[in-house]
Image (cartoon, rainbow, N blue to C red):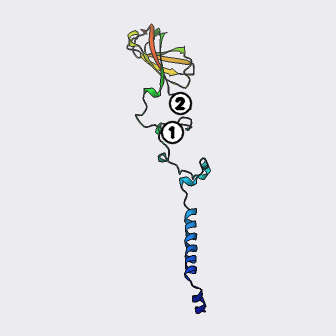
Amino acid sequence: MLRTLRSRLTYANVTATLALFVALGGTAYAVNTVRSTDIVDGEVKSVDIGNNEIGSGDVKDNSINTFDVHSFLGADVVDGSLTAKDFTKRELSVSLLVGTVGANTCKYVHFGLTGVADESLLITPEYASTTTTLMYDLEYRSTDVLSIKVCNPTPAAIDDGNTAFRILVIDSGFEG
């Protein structure tokens, strides 16, 4: 039998067998290797990508915009990165009759303010028209009523008369 095997063992048989092993090994390698040129444009879908497999390094800088993101939290914004250009603002001036505020009491002055729903307000009295011993505080009670709480911490009534206030309305542009 050994003689029969040797007589059939030729250079062609050895080469053919070796070629078969190389071809099978090369096919297995090719099946497990996918390159960018192997992918048809637009054919990779989200189901083809594992969960949490794409990171910020895989996304082109400045390519994601507000339409791609559903919400932001404070932790998503780099401290110190927002500037005045990131907000729109309006400044309003209003003069209100505060009148007399009793000793050791507080009084509310209400006025309508429209078009500021879901925006931030900063109000400051113009001290040239105020009595400096009174304290002013803003209370935003609804989407169209602004209340200013005026408190007198002194033991005597104070007549504040008309007081001018400056209101800064800040809109971040974000809708939540």
Q: Position of residue 14 (x, y in %)?
A: 55, 80
Residue drawn at 38 percent across, 14 percent down: 133
Q: Quadrant of the N terminus?
A: bottom right
- Camera-side residue: 160 or 55? 55
Residue hosting label 1: 63
Looking at numbered disc 2 in the image, what kind of residue is underneath it? Phe
Q: Characterize the local packing of mark 2: few (<14), some (14-19) or many (20 or more) Cα atoms within 10 angstroms.
A: few
**Could you tell which of marks 1 and 2 lies nearer the N-terminus?**
1
Which circle, 1 or 2, is nearer the viewer?
A: 1
- Against 16, residue 33 (above or below) is above
Looking at numbered disc 1 in the image, what kind of residue is underneath it? Ser
Residue drawn at 46 percent across, 28 percent down: 86
Q: Which mark is residue 174?
A: 2
Residue drawn at 60 percent across, 50 percent down: 40
Residue 38 placement: quadrant: bottom right
Q: Quadrant of the C terminus?
A: top right
